[in-house]
Image (spheres, grey):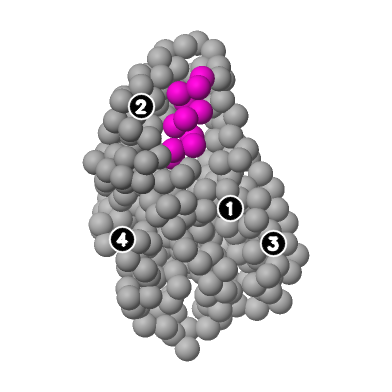
Amino acid sequence: MAHQLDDNHISSNEGYTHGYDSAITQKIHTGRTVDKQASWFLPYLKPGMTLLDCGCATGSITVGFADVVAPSQVIGVDISEAEIERARKRATEAAIENVRFEVGNIYQLDFPDQSFDAIFSHNVLEHVGEPSRAIKEMHRVLKPGGIIGVRDVDLGGRIYAPTDALMERFWVVYESDWVGVNGHPRIGHQLGGLLIEAGFTEVKASASYEVYSDPETRGGIAEVIVSRLSETDFVERVIERQFTNADELEAMKAAWQTWQERPDGFLAASHCEAVGRKA
């Protein structure tokens, strides 16, 4: 049976770690596409499949799925009303008719059992307090024989150069804050196991990198990180929890700004993917 949306089932400190209106959301998330971030899932899809995108954010990937599975419908859900409004605007402006967006709770999806042929989730499980519970709920609304695809970061696999003590301090502080607000920044390598635990079969896991190595991409990621280091909520949290201090935060920003100008600056952000089938 369908589960009614109940925000009380999401704890008060659970939500999107980076903030829905932060530079990370506005600069990176809106630029994500089905071809770049979901290419590994496309071989499992075909026209006529119904698809649910859990944690769709601004819908930049979701609208791409609409073309892949047309004429069937794609539904995107996200806990943020602001993100859903952005997604609806995107679909309207692109005149995409076989997609719709709804506010939804990944722990209590408002759909009957066995509703979808495919379910997709990108950079969501890393931000929820109970990833196993979220996966089991996605399992519930997937049809027998249906396919699930999940992708999340794993900070343990990051690669960057040249190395710098202040940049390394950023990663320590960033990860400590992420964990402190109920996240899982190293969940990527666990995705396959989580799908198996939830009852999925034919599970396949993989890994990939998003690379920032030219002036444009280095500048973009450095801008996002410097913005993060300047956001009031983040600054107050990390100082209050004694992860760092105001002077070190300023030094971190300067280090990233210097890095982006270096022709040998390189950053590869690690992600892991897992697909599975419902028996």
Q: Which mark is residue 248?
A: 2
Q: On screen, 45 above or below 32?
A: below
Check if residue 128 falls in the magenta segment: no
Mark 2 crowd level (few <14, some 14–19, many ≥20, 10 Å Cα): few
Residue at 53% x, 83% y: name it.
113
Return the disc, 4 or 1, that comes first in the chain's sequence.
4
Label 4 to label 2, Cα distance in Å?
32 Å
Q: Which residues are magenta?
A: 164-174
Q: On screen, 195 above or below 150?
A: below
Residue 171: image location, x then y, percent? 48, 35
Q: Quadrant of the C terminus?
A: bottom right
Check if residue 171 falls in the magenta segment: yes
Return the disc, 2 or 1, that comes first in the chain's sequence.
1
Q: Which mark is residue 130?
A: none
Return the disc, 2 or 3, that comes first in the chain's sequence.
3
Residue holding disc 3: 193
**Which kind of residue does numbered mark 3 sit on?**
Gly
Residue holding disc 4: 80
Mark 4 touching mark 3, by CB under 8 A? Answer: no
Return the disc, 3 or 1, that comes first in the chain's sequence.
1
Residue holding disc 1: 187
